Amino acid sequence: MQAPELSTVFAALADPTRRAILARLSEGEAPVKDLATPFDLSGPAITKHLNVLERAGLITRGRDGQRRPCRLEPQALAPATDWIEQLRSAWEARLDRLDAYLKSLAPAPQPRRRRRPPPSRTAGVTRGRKT
Amino acid sequence: MQAPELSTVFAALADPTRRAILARLSEGEAPVKDLATPFDLSGPAITKHLNVLERAGLITRGRDGQRRPCRLEPQALAPATDWIEQLRSAWEARLDRLDAYLKSLAPAPQPRRRRRPPPSRTAGVTRGRKT
């Protein structure tokens, strides 16, 4: 089932502290205590955030005793970017169809603006009559 | 403030019904009742989802009386894709630095695997002794 996973990933990203943790981990592995420090978070609070990120597959945690270094798993972002990309493609395909439809209605090139009938093109011809 | 907006966008995407509504709207505008039908949602339930999407800037709603057609606003996804892209870039830059560092440690080309000291390269030389 892809939908629940995708929801879990988006939900994990929907928090500024979790995004900041991911940004920190994009610079390299870090132990939990290093991640907690800049946010002034309690132990349970940081653990909760890390659990959410881990469930979404966005991080993994090493088994290095107390240290348990956290590591970013950027491939877990792929379903999210794929979904957004798919939505954009569908939207652009729709715009292309709309464009093609509008062109089919008006095959001849149209002037950009034509609010009233164009000024008489015969002015040059009729000028002879005036003089 | 960019962070709360980004959180709102990600949170809006973290629900399969809301993603399905966006996917439907990527095919074109739709009135609220057309959006509610496939999900068998009550009026208040669909309104709640549409409110979340509207607050995230992902849809707008027309003022066409009862019909109020909904429209996708795909540009609202840009901050989300930008953020993910930025994270990926930082990660890749880190891998490049790591790669450069490893190359600086071992300038000569290395065999792919070397779990133990390589087998004696002098075998060909010493064979003479054995015979």
Image (spheres, coloured by chain):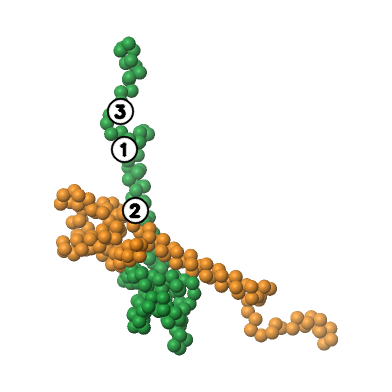
Chain colours: A orange, B green
- Position in image of residue B47 (x %, y %): 36, 81
- Position in image of residue B98 (x %, y %): 32, 45
**Which of the 4 image quadrants contains residue B45?**
bottom left
Q: 10 Å neighbourhood of mark 2: few (<14), some, or many (≥20)?
A: many
First reached walking from the N terminus: tag 1 or tag 3: 1
Question: Is B29 positioned to the left or the right of A17 in the image?
Answer: right
Foreground pick, A42 / B37: B37
Q: Is B100 located above or below residue B114 in the figure?
A: below
Which amino acid, by three-letter code, is at mark 3? Pro
Foreground pick, A94 / B3: A94
**Which of the 4 image quadrants contains residue A107?**
bottom right
The label shown at residue B18 is none
Q: Specify the subunit that label 1 lies on.
A: B
Q: 10 Å neighbourhood of mark 3: few (<14), some, or many (≥20)?
A: few
The label shown at residue B118 is 3
Q: Which residue is mark 1?
A: B105
Please state, as top left, top right, bottom left or bottom right, where the C terminus of chain A lies in the image. bottom right
Residues at marks 1 and 2, CA–CA distance in whole angstroms: 21 Å
Q: Residue at x 35, y 18 (%)?
A: B124
Q: Residue at x 30, y 26 (%)?
A: B119
Report if residue A87 is visible in the image.
Answer: yes
Which amino acid, by three-letter code, is at mark 1? Leu
Q: Residue at x 60, y 73 (%)?
A: A101
Q: Secondary structure at mark 2?
A: helix
Q: Which circle, 1 or 2, is nearer the viewer?
A: 2
Q: Specify the subunit that label 3 lies on.
A: B
Please state, as top left, top right, bottom left or bottom right, where the N terminus of chain A lies in the image. bottom left
Q: Which residue is mark 2?
A: B91
Asked if labels 2 and 1 touch by Cβ distance under 8 angstroms, the answer is: no
Residues at marks 3 and 2, CA–CA distance in whole angstroms: 34 Å
For this orientation, the residue located farthest to the bottom is B65
